[in-house]
Amino acid sequence: MSGEEYAIPSQPLPVSSRSPGKCIIFGEHAVVHGAPELAFAVDLHTQVLARSAPGFSLNADPHAAEEHPYFRTALARRWVGGTPLEVRSTSRIPQGAGLGSSASFCSALVAVLGAAQGGVDRPALAQASYDVEKAAQGVGSPGDTSTVAAGGYITINGAGGDHLWTIRGSERDWEVRRVADPGWVWVVAHSGIPRATGDAVRNVTQRLAQPDGPELLAEFARVATAGIRAVAGGDRVAVAELMARNQELLRTVGVSHPRLEALLEAAAPAAEGAKLTGAGAGGSIVVLPKPGQEVDLVRRLARAGGLPFVVRPSPVGTTLVGEPEL
């Protein structure tokens, strides 16, 4: 394969990349156990710039190569024996918000490292980004990293359109497919309560190990499967109903939070559907607004103490860009 055929082409240092965030509509947590998930890339981005330097650093921190889990892991897995790098990163994605800040950083970083080593195709970018994030967190699924690498709407282990790639894991594999964009606007709102994905995933795993766990997992899968079909068909009524059911399941496995519930209550008058998104136990909610009520929804969420964003799917996943002012 020539360099021109790579999604991330060969480019000498300095090299810069941009990667979107993500929002999960259906199936978070259950996807870790093989159930389907539906997510889309959001138009909030992380940019990463890498250039040669006397020593390794991340945003001027010379200790990051030993202390920053994602940076350390990416260097160990994707830059073995490479020359020292100065890496700078900036992001519009709130950290700990359930909107893919770590996945976006990992994919953007893997992209610049791959470009500097001759280029990388998109399936390999998705696999490598997942491997870095999983190794740094200890747990998780490839949903976040595949979404930001692909752009648009995707399913993990669910029905959909074109097959994009298969992510290999130590315990299972995940099939990643494209889903048609229904053309909707969404609103996400950060609660201001940070959450740790690894802790939330481990807690849900313990909950699903209880006697009713298989039944709960089956219901997560049923809701996600129906939700994928509803989004692909542009059925807003069905999507709203299924988001409510998904939120009930997330409450049952213990990952909602009083601040999230307050935001959901504040959103209700201007929302068709709403639920938490991501790992939960803090983080953010995602809302399908009633048409024409996006501004009212944003005001309601802000008055309730949230940090709202009107978001649209980013059709372009991780890509190289001209050198930014970082």
Image (cartoon, grey):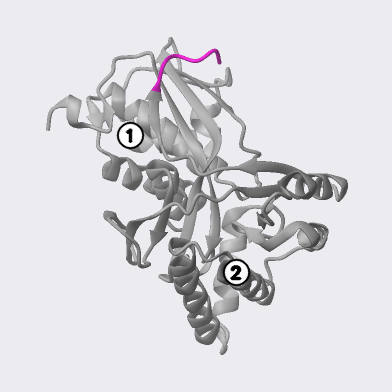
Q: Going by the image, does 255 lie left or right of 321?
A: right
Residue pushed farthest right? Answer: 303
Q: Which residue is mark 2?
A: 237
Residue 325, magenta (yes or no)? yes
Q: Nearer the viewer, residue 66 or 53?
A: 53
The magenta stretch is: 321-326
Q: Nearer the viewer, residue 79 or 309?
A: 309
Q: Residues within 10 Å of mark 2 (few under 14, many from 20)?
A: few
Where residue 62 sits: x, y (%)? 55, 20
Q: Examine the rendered structure and indicate whether residue 202 appears above or below residue 197.
A: below
- Residue sitting at 18 percent across and 25 percent down? 3
Where residue 147 sits: x, y (%)? 43, 48
Residue 294, magenta (yes or no)? no
Type of the residue with mark 1? Arg
Q: Examine the rendered structure and indicate whether residue 238 appears above or below residue 162.
A: below
Q: Quadrant of the N terminus?
A: top left
Q: Nearer the viewer, residue 254 or 6?
A: 6
Mark positioned earlier in the residue sequence (1 or 2)? 1
Q: Which residue is mark 1?
A: 78
Type of the residue with mark 2? Val
